Amino acid sequence: MNVKQINTLISQLKKIDFTHARIKIDDFELEIDRDGSEQIVDSDTEVITSPMIGIFHQNEQPIKVGDVVDKTAVLGQIESMKLYNELVAGVEGQITKVLVADGAAVEFGQNLFEIELNEDI
């Protein structure tokens, strides 16, 4: 399977309610566990989640709590299958929580950053 097929598969799985899934296609195997808990977040807060499984890498100048970001800000990169994929904020606001460390393994949909939305930025 290539990266595009994997991302498509994960997108489809996101639509299904389950707690554990194990998928094997030829030499590719994917196992996903969900704990079923939901996090309540302020409506003025946006949670940036991992779009894929991989290893999170900080920028040369790491994003930290208090930093103000715009929609195009790169929050870090996720290494998956030896490819580095930029994690873009997509919203404007101030970083209120950094929930991932440099070099940490991340799962699809895992919360990585919380951004307090600010329409004045």
Image (cartoon, rainbow, N blue to C red):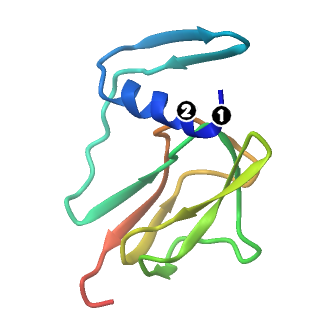
**Residue 117 is drawn in which quadrant?**
bottom left
Up-down relation of residue 70 to residue 45 (above or below): below
Depth check, front residue: 12 or 41? 12
Instruction: Please state the horizontal and vertical placement of residue 64, each as a whole percent of the image.
Output: 59, 71
Q: Position of residue 71 (x, y in %)?
A: 42, 76
Q: Position of residue 57 (x, y in %)?
A: 72, 57
Please identify the quarter of the rendering in which residue 35 is found.
top left
114 relative to 54 in the view: left or right? left
* SS for dot 2: helix
Q: Which mark is residue 19?
A: none
In the picture of the structure, the residue carrying the numbered disc 2 is 5
Q: Position of residue 48 (x, y in %)?
A: 43, 56
Count of numbered marks: 2
- Name the kind of residue labelled 1 in the image: Asn
User: The disc labelled 2 sits on which kind of residue?
Assistant: Gln
Query: Is 14 left, or right, of 111 in this rendering?
Result: left
**Cβ atoms under marks 2 and 1 closer than 8 Å:** yes
- For image coordinates 46% across by 34% down, the residue present is 8
Taking the spot 53% from the left edge, 71% from the top edge, the residue there is: 65
Q: Is residue 45 left or right of residue 62?
A: left
Which element carries disc 1, helix, strand or loop? Answer: loop
Which quadrant does the N terminus fall into? top right
Is 70 situated above or below 35?
A: below
Q: In which quadrant of the rendered image does the C terminus lie? A: bottom left
- Give the residue number, with chain letter if any, for mark 1: 2
Cα–Cα gap, marks 2 and 1: 5 Å
Q: Residue at x 39, y 24 (%)?
A: 13
Q: Residue at x 29, y 62 (%)?
A: 45
Q: Residue furthest right?
A: 82
